Amino acid sequence: MKSITIKGSERESVGKVATKALRNAGAVPCVLYGGDQPVHFSAEEKAFKNLVYTPNAHTVVIELEGKSFNAVLQDIQVHPVSDKVLHIDFFQLFDDKEITMEVPVKITGVSPGVLLGGDLRLNTRRLKVKALPKNLPDYVEANISELQMGNKLYVTKLVVDNYKLLHPDNTVVCQVKISRAAMKAAQEAAKAAKAGPAKGKKK
């Protein structure tokens, strides 16, 4: 999995006044959990641009005055009106401990059902995976090459490599639904087939 480096500074004061001052200065207060003690730090808001405003999943290298920590984003608080990042929680990674995180779904292949006019619906855009840090995937591949009209692709059909998918077996990743145009064409074909024999009946 790709990694983003964020350079910050440890916070000595974590009260409301200090936190407000940080935000006013264009910085984001953060906490790193998972180690022996939580680490409070801050970094410039623009440092999180490629981490927060993207559909991709990343691990993070947090650099704090000579110290370095590997982590993943755990929780983020955003202002409901301005979309300004208010606070971020990270969770520290260790090489020998599995971690759980969400990664995007990447559609591959061409569906025969779509070629016939069906609509591809992506039911699950992100999937929760569990793996050692070195095995975390950038995305989970969903191959739709065998999806006919009306078919669904379940999570059990996905190919996984050195990681686990934490979803029930009946989770639908995507499906090919019959489009209105295809449904209308099928109805008209059925009507024509039904009407055909009737014309040929003997009087």
Image (spheres, rainbow, N blue to C red):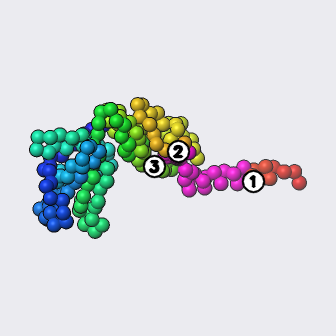
Location of the N terminus by quadrant is top left
- Position of 41 compared to 140: left or right? left
Residue occupying image coordinates x 25% and y 66%: 82
The residue identified by callout 3 is 124
Residue 201 on image: x %, y %: 84, 51
Identify residue type, mark 3: Thr
- In the rendered image, the residue lying farthest to the front is 36
How far is mark 1 from mark 3, CA to CA? 42 Å
| Neighbours of disc 2 within 10 Å: few (<14), some (14-19), many (20+) | few
In the image, 129 versus 173, the foreground residue is: 129
Location of the C terminus by quadrant is bottom right
Q: Secondary structure at mark 2?
A: loop
Residue occupying image coordinates x 37% and y 44%: 101
The residue identified by callout 1 is 195
Identify residue type, mark 2: Pro
Look at the picture and state if 126 lies above or below 135. below
| Neighbours of disc 1 within 10 Å: few (<14), some (14-19), many (20+) | few
